[in-house]
Amino acid sequence: MFTSAESFTLCDAMWESHSSPFDLHYGLEIDEATDELVRAHVPVREHLLQPVGLVHGGVHASIAEALASVGTNVGVVPDGNIGLGMSNNSTFLRSIREGTIHATARRIHRGRTTWVWDVELTDDEGRLCAVSRVTIAVRPLRN
């Protein structure tokens, strides 16, 4: 586990936990990660809720971008590149108040400079709660 921003490196994130310090803060747990499919979940906790008791939309968007970034980096880091969030369009369909947010990201485009992912977020009953399309920019990794 990372304890500070200084201890975070891309290699640590990719090969040890797949999660950044921010992702760890909201509770992202990666279940599976390839360059085509990423699955994860987030237990709903009080600090993720809006004042009215619903999971904040920013949590859904953060999960989507994290999964797309992890999947892209699995594919591009070995070639000396890095994937960085470029666009995130999230639509919220059903609220979540408790339980677990389940997320699945599927790559739909693998280009030289961009990858595009569709992400579905569901509740414990498997009901679709949010969808996101995330574009990840692929750039040379700088030292």
Image (cartoon, helix red, strand yellow):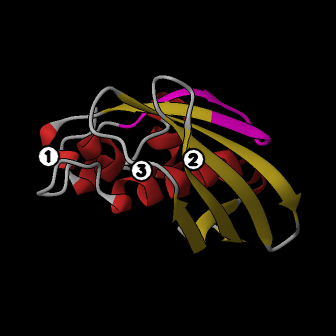
The x and y percentages for residue 42 are 37, 34
Q: CA distance from mark 1 to mark 2?
A: 21 Å
Q: Which residue is mark 1?
A: 47
From the image, give the main secondary structure of the stretch colored magenta. Answer: strand
Q: In which image quadrant can residue 108 be found? A: bottom right
* Residue occupied by mark 3: 9
Give the image location of residue 72, x and y in percent.
70, 53
Query: Disc 3 to disc 2, how far (Cα)?
Result: 17 Å
Amino acid of disc 2: Leu
Name the residue that disc number 2 marks. Answer: 67
The residue at 80%/41% (across/down) is 36
**Numbered range of the magenta stretch:** 28-38
- Relative to residue 48, is residue 103 drawn left or right? right
Disc 3 residue crowd, few under 14, some 14–19, many 20+, Cα 10 Å: few
Give the quarter of the figure containing the N terminus: top left
Separation of marks 3 and 1 at Cα, in angstroms: 26 Å
For the residue carrying disc 2, how many other residues have a C-alpha within 10 Å: few (<14), some (14-19), or many (20+)? many
SS at badge 1: helix
* Camera-side mark, 3 or 1: 1
Q: Which amino acid, by three-letter code, is at mark 1?
A: His
Q: Is residue 31 magenta?
A: yes
Which one is nearer the viewer's eye here, 82 or 96? Answer: 96
Mark toward the viewer: 3 or 2? 2
Q: Is residue 30 above or below residue 48?
A: above
Q: Say which residue appears at 54% left-offset and 65% top-offset.
A: 90
Among the two numbered marks 3 and 1 on one chain, the one whose residue lies closer to the N terminus? 3
